[in-house]
Image (cartoon, helix red, strand yellow):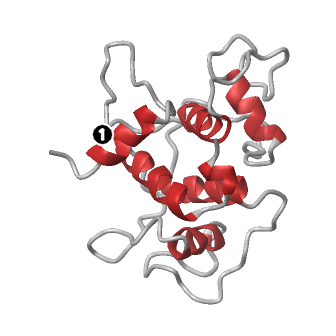
C-alpha cells in the first residue's frame, strides 16, 4: 500500500493521467516538465490538449504529444520558459518550480508574493520561489518532509505530484478544481 494510492487513483478517475502504455503509473519516476504541462491542462480543462499549429518554444516541436499543453501553459502565463528561450520539456520538474506553476495556475495574472518569513527552514526568504512555496503551504498542499524541510530543489516524483494536485483540488480556486 502506498501513501499516494488515493491521490493516484483520483488522478486516474479525473482523467488527469491514464499512465503509461504498459498500464503502469511509475509513481516514483521523476516528473518531466512536459508531463507536468499535460497534467495541468487535463486538470484544468478536463481533456487532452489540442494539437499544435506552431511550436510555443524553440525546443518543443509542433508535432510533440505535449506541444498543445505546453502552448497552453505559455498562453496562461504559467510558464515563460527558461532564460535561453526554451521550455526544456524533458527536464525533471523541481519542487520549487512546481510550486510556481501551481501558484500561477491558481492566481492568473497575480504577481508572485514575496516572503517576509521562511515557509520552511530550507527555503530562504531570498529564494525566487519562496512566495509560491509559502502559498502552497497556506493552501495546505504541503507540510514538507518529516525533517521539516520543503527540499525545494528536489526533483518531483509522479506520486508526489498526484498528492499536490489532489490536495489543491480540495482547497484552491476553480483553476485547479475544474471541471
Neighbour tally class for label 1: few under 14, some 14-19, many 20 plus, Cα within 10 Å: few
Residue 49: percent from the left, percent from the top? 68, 24
40 above or below 17? below
Residue 170: percent from the left, percent from the top? 51, 60
**Residue 158 in sight in this render:** no
Residue drawn at point x = 80 percent, y = 28 percent: 56
Residue drawn at point x = 60 percent, y = 62 percent: 172
* In the image: residue 75, left or right of residue 167: right
Residue drawn at point x = 58 percent, y = 89 percent: 117
Q: Quadrant of the rendered structure where residue 154 is?
A: bottom left
In which quadrant will I find the N terminus?
A: top left
How many discs mark residues in the rendered view? 1
Residue 31: percent from the left, percent from the top? 46, 38
**Residue 159 in sight in this render:** yes
Residue 64: percent from the left, percent from the top? 66, 15
6 above or below 127? above
* In the image: residue 149, left or right of residue 36: left
The residue labelled by disc 1 is: 28
In which quadrant will I find the C terminus?
A: top right
* In the image: residue 90, left or right of residue 155: right
83 and 140: which is toward the camera: 140
Q: What element carries label 1?
A: loop
Q: Residue furthest bottom?
A: 116
Q: Residue furthest left?
A: 1
Q: Quadrant of the rendered structure where residue 96 is?
A: bottom right
172 and 136: which is toward the camera: 172
105 above or below 86? below
Amino acid at each position: 500500500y502506498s501513501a499516494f494510492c488515493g491521490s493516484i487513483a483520483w488522478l486516474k478517475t479525473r482523467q488527469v493521467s491514464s499512465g503509461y502504455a504498459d498500464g503502469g503509473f511509475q509513481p516514483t519516476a521523476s516528473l518531466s516538465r512536459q508531463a507536468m504541462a499535460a497534467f495541468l491542462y487535463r486538470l484544468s480543462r478536463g481533456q487532452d490538449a489540442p494539437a499544435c499549429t506552431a511550436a510555443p518554444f524553440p525546443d518543443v516541436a509542433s508535432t510533440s504529444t505535449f506541444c498543445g499543453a505546453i502552448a497552453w501553459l505559455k498562453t496562461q502565463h504559467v510558464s515563460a520558459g527558461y532564460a535561453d528561450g526554451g521550455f526544456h520539456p524533458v527536464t525533471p520538474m523541481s519542487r520549487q518550480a512546481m510550486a510556481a506553476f501551481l501558484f500561477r495556475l491558481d492566481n492568473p495574472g497575480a504577481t508572485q508574493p514575496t516572503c517576509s518569513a521562511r515557509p520552511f527552514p530550507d527555503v530562504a526568504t531570498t529564494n525566487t520561489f519562496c512566495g509560491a512555496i509559502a502559498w502552497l503551504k497556506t493552501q495546505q498542499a504541503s507540510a514538507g518532509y518529516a525533517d521539516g524541510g520543503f527540499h525545494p530543489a528536489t526533483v518531483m516524483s509522479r506520486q508526489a505530484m498526484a498528492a499536490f494536485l489532489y490536495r489543491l483540488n480540495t482547497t484552491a480556486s476553480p483553476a485547479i478544481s475544474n471541471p
